[in-house]
Image: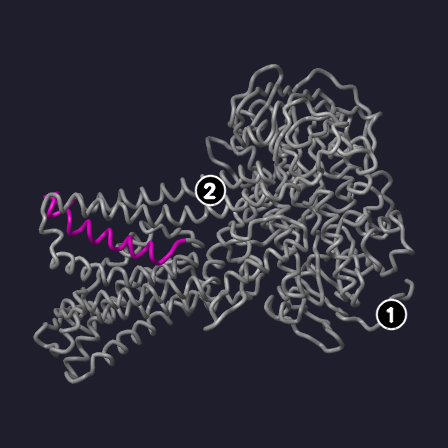
Amino acid sequence: MTRTTEPSTVERGHEPADRRGNEPGELASAGQAGARLVRRRFVVRELGIAIALLALVGVTAARNSDFLSVQSIKDLLLGATILVVLAVGQTIVVITRNIDLSVGSILGLSAFATGKLFLALPDTPVVLAILAGVGLGVLCGIVNGGLIAVARVPALVVTLGTLYVFRGIDFSWAAGQQINAADMPRSFKNLGTQTVLGVPVLALFAVVVLLAAGFYLRSYRSGRDLYAIGSDPQAARLAGIPVGRRVFGVFVASGALAGLAGVLYAARFGTLDANAGTGMELNVVAAVVVGGVAIFGGSGSVYGAALGALLLTTIGSALPVLRIDPFWQQAVVGALILAAIGLDRALTFRMAHRLTEVDARGA
Amino acid sequence: MSELHESGPALLAVSGVSKSFGAVHALVDMDLELRAGVVHSLVGENGAGKSTLVKILAGVHVPDTGTLTLAGRPVVLSGPADARAAGIAVIYQEPTLFPDLSVAENIFIGRQPLRSLRRIDAAQMRRRTEDLFGRLGVRLDPDRPARGLSIADQQLVEIAKALSFDARVLVMDEPTAALSGVEVERLFAVVRSLRQAGVAILFISHRFDEVFALSQQITVMRDGRKVSTDPASELDVPTLVRRMVGREVADLFPKQDTESGDAVLQVRGLTRRGVFEQVSFDVRRGEIVALAGLVGAGRSEVVRAIFGVDRYDEGEVLVDGKSLPRGRPAAAMAAGLALVPEDRRQQGLVMELSVERNATLTRRWALARLGLLRRRTERRAAQTWAQRLQVKAGRLSDAVSTLSGGNQQKVVLAKWLSTSPKVLIVDEPTRGIDVATKAEVHRLMSELAGAGVAVLMVSSELPEVLGMADRILVMHEGRLVREIPRHQADEESVMLAATGHAAREAETGAGPWTGEGGGTA
């Protein structure tokens, strides 16, 4: 809207009283500017991580061209697979303003259970083993979700508790036993090594999970409900969203994905004891945060989280190539988390500011 | 109590409904009948039980006793989803939007239009949002997030939401509290067309002109009970006020004449690009100055900049001749400024904290011994103010969120008055507050001015501006366009300056400020 520079007087005449709705052309452009800002924020977030990833790969490859060999890329994808699957589950949880710290323990339990299953019944079809692992994860998720949604205990506390409980069950079940790759049937171990058109099968699992979750979150009512719940739980209740049921479902989904990750872990490493996946939960949360998912819920995407997981895995394999002390790996991850949060804050602030200015100019 | 004039059976009937929260009887044996094509207004002081009734109709609260009947059949609303399924739309006093979601998604959340495989049809959602905004006559981008929308725009999104599901019953809990005249008029046009389409409407407002302009039936509530239901044509304002408070309110605007002294607050050429420009004025000791104008004219932004909450690009703020540093509320407080903000829930109070904690927040350091704050000291300080302002709270240790709007506002006032400010800035001091509390707040402001405090008041309610201010400064699109002394001020002169309209146009576009407010938009 144009603002006259001469001193305003009452008698100025036809200055419109309605500041909204007079100059359609300009207003429309102001509105589109708002939408553009939102889209740009999405792009900046995801693109930022992608660029960081490419830069890291580029620098490392310049040092050691083997880093870009087919085998090395394959290893990278394999290494990231499990983290990506867990990060997708964690993203769904974090979007609703919750957190699931028990995923590492669920993974451990599921991986060990898979090993036990093949020890007992070596002829179990692979599909059945996967379903068993996912089923175990679902059970764990039901425990988490039940306590959180029904008993209304904060997720941080519940899943911190079940982190130890599930790991404890794992330990007492394993009782020091170790399952070796030799005990696994060949068909299952193939899962960890086979490729389709050069892409590891395990990585395909991650890709399918990622695309399915991304599609669900974007295109389904219940998926959008999750963003609404994280954005304002109270308003979600008033809008008639079944908050309890959705949060319950989210933890079941996270458990299921952690269970799946456990099976994939067993297929990849073969050697299993009760320690599988210990401490993994923090890597997952780190990947999600680096991937631009707001820790207070309401925004972020599984794609960002997957990129975050890929970035963290790449750092892990790039630093040895660059001959950097492993100690620094943790420091780098820490710095990345802080940078991601800083970037997110800055973007949110700038967007709010720009939207206000758009309003001030246009409305 | 006279018989209802409107014919036809009730679309939604509330009978014998009671609801208690602990020892508080929020609603006692309430009866209400809403008819298709009738706007039914509900008036009463804050705490009279209006909001509780709204929440029962919304399915948020389940009544302890009594029944709801919808189109002749008893209904049980055990959740907001039930109410929505029954065709009852509720627009709450405070908007309940999701800041991270787009405007279109906010409107259609849980009911998004679907295409094959039950996927959300984003294009259709966008189109329908645009249609709704078209009906409302607003221009908002459906794709922008709700974060950063003004309260007025948020309220419009809420209204679009209610429109979107073709409700049979529309409940509006003070939808106009944050709207400007034009926006109110636009809303009224929509409400009237809904009424003609046969929607039953329950309308709650503290603005009597709106109540009379819009409704055919008026029910008065007091202390959780129904006092009366009458056709609007048989009522007038004094009668309503008497029934609401149970006594006469002698004077809503008890303005004392005061001698104004030296200029305490001086604002010089304050500019924030794109928001306000070259704003200069003085406020003198013992004087009440009103900053009038339409919503969006930049009034709140100016006072926020003065207090140091927002930055400004140019200009200067002086208190007692000394310049205030920019952007530092602590310095402003130390210099004797107090700001009672516009949005008490977001900016004025910590909703989860107790009444006493909130009331003493501004004086934590003054009250502390050796850096420690003792509960007893806090409570004593809070008690003094709670008594002076007659805050109605179960216990001072209750969370502020449990209080009614008027009482919350009193707590905000207590918090700032306890700092003994030289300059009190109040932004919409009586928004969403009932008549009796309004009069109390006005009396308080008048007393403070009498005691030598300089009061700067931002208000969208013209009667309040005219009744309370010694001088009226009118803003229009970020500029101070006119200064009107008390004896020259009338509705027309302020409206003219606020809108920049010629005299005749001002009458039709004035909305709630004119007595009628009944023109078509």
Q: Chain of mark 2?
A: A
Spot occupied by residue B343 in the image (x, y as percentages of width and height) = 62, 42
Q: CA distance from mark 2 to mark 1?
A: 53 Å
- Front position among marks 2 and 1: 2
Q: Which residue is mark 2?
A: A351
Q: Residue at x 50, y 70 (%)?
A: B115
Give, as a three-letter code, the residue at label 2: Met
Identify the amino acid type marked 1.
Answer: Ser
Q: Main secondary structure of the magenta part?
A: helix
Where does the magenta region start and end?
Answer: A300-327
Instruction: Residue B131 in the image: state x and y as whole percent.
Output: 63, 57
Please tell me which residue is depicted at 71% across the width and 65% down the height of the picture. Answer: B169
The answer to which of B73 and B493 lies nearer the viewer is B493
Disc 1 secondary structure class:
loop
Q: Which mark is residue B295?
A: none
Q: Residue at x 57, y 29 (%)?
A: B305
Mark 2 neighbour class, 10 Å CA radius: few under 14, some 14 to 19, many 20 or more:
many
Task: Tell which subunit mark 1 falls on.
Answer: B
**Magenta includes B477?**
no
Q: Nearer the viewer, residue B126 or B264?
A: B126
**Residue receiving disc 1:** B7
Q: Measuring from the top left, give residue B350's x and y in whole percent.
A: 55, 44
Find numbered disc 2 in the image and state the secondary structure of the residue it sits on: helix
Q: Is residue B93 left or right of residue B101?
A: right
In the picture, the quarter occupied by the N terminus of chain B is bottom right
